[in-house]
Image (cartoon, rainbow, N blue to C red):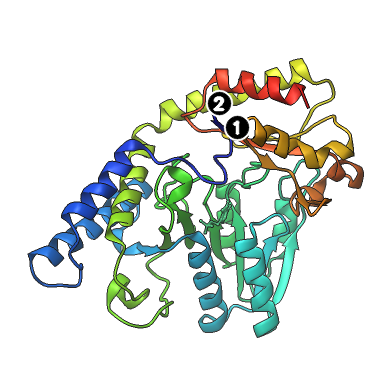
Amino acid sequence: MKKIYLDNAATTPLRPEVIQTIINTLENDFGNPSSTHSFGRSGKTNVETARKTIAKHLNCSAQEIIFTANATEATNWILREMVKNHNIKKIITSKIEHHATLYTVLNLQKEFGIDVEYVKVLPNGTLDLFDLERKLDSEIPTLVTLMHVNNEIGTVLDLDRVTSICQKYQAVFHCDTVQSIGKVKIDLDKTPIDFLVASAHKFHGPKGIGFAFIRKNRIMQPMLFGGEQEKGLRAGTEAVHQIAGMAKAFDLAHEFLTEETDYITDLKRYCIEQLHNNFEGIVINGENTFYNILNVLLPFSEEKTAMILFNLDMKGIAVSRGSACQSGSVKPSHVLAEFLSEENTKKPSLRISFSHYNTKEEIDIFIESLKTI
Ligand code: PLP
């Protein structure tokens, strides 16, 4: 059975060149970057070259990139640091953020008693930026944390508008770019984001490695205490092979950005067309969504919700849920619940997410399999 992977918003397969880079590093560059001998210096060079590669594509300076285990770790560190040591009294976010943000914010609210407000979600799954502006007040030290591309429905935040609103009210802006980075050009010289977080496994790199962009005027306290690694901000011996693999993945993502964007955009268009041709009454959740994420409401009965993913999985097809199925009962996704009617949140929704490794033939097989359910 040929397996079909249409869950690239969850994680992505590694590019062969990335695997090769990781193997090469493991084989030939095992030195500890903190050691002063040639083995160590080579490891250090590898780490610093990776940092420069990432910074070059984001048009920022290498010192502004801090390697972390993943985006969750980076978000936890940054938000906590801003509240604990930078006098942030209020956080504005939205109910459709990833739990890495939502639960961090809730914990900070509990621990530090900060004020938390949620930007209104519009019926098309985007955020009401007039509401964001209404919630801002220059007198209260505020941090805004909003994701660039929503991981469940693919709606896109207007970064230019949000950064200019934040500047107008002197609010700090933290952006979760996990789903967009490496898939769209981000120029940090032109876009005044204060903090950005990323995970390598979302752009065909390895798991267990990510990075934070910390704009140079932001002075941070360490996330972990110990050695001098990462300017003393995140102590602990660097995972050189993962860092090198991430930089390779980031470099390749940018090298092939235009052609892969065009290819995936066409795949998504084809998938939508085929879904409409084969299922009457199919609805796309979210408007103007990102080119690799498609969330659809299927015109199937509620009872089928629990069975769809299971049946597709039996056929070797991996897609993701729109509604979480837990021990027989169906719990709506916290994102869909924010803007779909109660009736529609109970109906089966699927998230189909593409990469350049997918083909139209795979989409045909997916559609045929869906028809048999
Ligand atoms: N933010 C978004 C938008 C995501 O999609 C994810 C992962 O699914 C995360 C944050 C967390 O990423 P990680 O688990 O790699 O830390």
Q: Is residue 285 visible?
A: no
From what the image shows, is residue 135 above or below residue 293? Answer: below
In the image: residue 59, left or right of residue 9: left
Residue appearing at x 30%, y 66% in the figure: 238
Residue appearing at x 37%, y 73% in the figure: 234
From what the image shows, is residue 330 above or below residue 232? Answer: above
**Residue 253 or 298: which is nearer the viewer?**
298
In the image: residue 75, left or right of residue 92: left
Q: Residue furthest right?
A: 343
Residue 147, given in percent of the width and then of the height, sits at 60, 54
Residue appearing at x 38%, y 49% in the figure: 58
Please name the residue that numbered disc 1 is placed on: 316
Quadrant containing ligand 1: bottom right
Q: Where on the picture, by quarter, is residue 31?
A: bottom left
Q: Where on the picture, by quarter, is residue 133?
A: bottom right
Disc 1, SS: loop
**Residue 127 or 224: which is nearer the viewer?**
224
CA neighbours of label 1 inside 10 A, class few (<14), some (14 to 19), many (20+): some
On the rendered image, what quadrant is the N terminus found in? top right
Alpha-carbon distance for marks 2 and 1? Answer: 7 Å
Residue 344, given in percent of the width and then of the height, sits at 87, 41
For badge 2, the amino acid type reads: Met
In the image: residue 77, left or right of residue 32: right
Q: Is mark 1 within 8 Å of ligand 1?
A: no
Closer to the chain start, of discs 2 and 1, is 2
Asked if disc 2 and disc 1 are in contact, CB closer than 8 Å, the reply is: yes
Please name the residue that numbered disc 2 is placed on: 1
CA neighbours of label 2 inside 10 A, class few (<14), some (14 to 19), many (20+): few
Disc 2, SS: loop
For badge 1, the amino acid type reads: Gly
On the rendered image, what quadrant is the C terminus found in? top right
